[in-house]
Image (cartoon, rainbow, N blue to C red):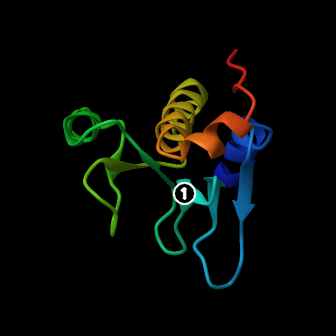
Amino acid sequence: MSLRDRCLAIAGDWPGVVHATADSELPSLKVGGKMFATFGHVEPGVSVKTDSIDTATMLIDAGVAGRAPYFHRSWVRLPEAVAEDELRHRLGLSYDLVRASLKKAEREALPPRETA
């Protein structure tokens, strides 16, 4: 199963998630029109948002992730071989961070995300 398929299996049913695949966009997962995960065309992996530059640096230094090219330093790139539990955790945190940044009316219109 490809990394994109793995991400869709995890996050595809979360409230408000859209799988953007238009030619004018990077393939990505969005909530409220804002990206929380994106798949590169050249370098394999998935880029996700972290809560801070410090967290991103810690993940990079620990070898869990790499720097996400062209993104803010609080984003990291997870490799294709990322463990399923780490992928689920990082996608969930990224989704929650981006969802929390939506306008109040948009946030309140979305049902809670079920966590397992």
Residue 59, placed above or below residue 67: above
Residue 30 appears left or right of 58: right
Q: Amino acid at mark 1?
A: Met
Look at mark 1 in the image and give the residue it sits on. Answer: 35
Residue 64, placed above or below residue 98: above
| Element assignment for label 1 | strand
- Give the quadrant of residue 53: top left
Q: Nearer the viewer, residue 57 or 94?
A: 94
Q: Residues within 10 Å of mark 1 (few under 14, many from 20)?
A: many
Q: Image point 26% across, 33% down: which residue?
A: 55
Q: Image point 51% across, 61% down: which residue?
A: 44
The image shows residue 54 at horizontal and vertical percentages of: 19, 36
Residue at the farthest bottom position: 24
Q: Nearer the viewer, residue 107 or 17?
A: 107
- Give the quadrant of residue 68: bottom left
The image shows residue 39 at horizontal and vertical percentages of: 56, 62
The image shows residue 43 at horizontal and vertical percentages of: 46, 67
Residue at the farthest front position: 105
Q: Nearer the viewer, residue 105 or 21?
A: 105
Residue 33, placed above or below residue 74: below
Residue at the farthest top position: 116
Residue 77 appears left or right of 52: right
Residue 86, placed above or below residue 3: above
Q: Quadrant of the C terminus?
A: top right
Q: Image point 54% across, 57% down: which residue?
A: 35
Residue 58 appears left or right of 36: left
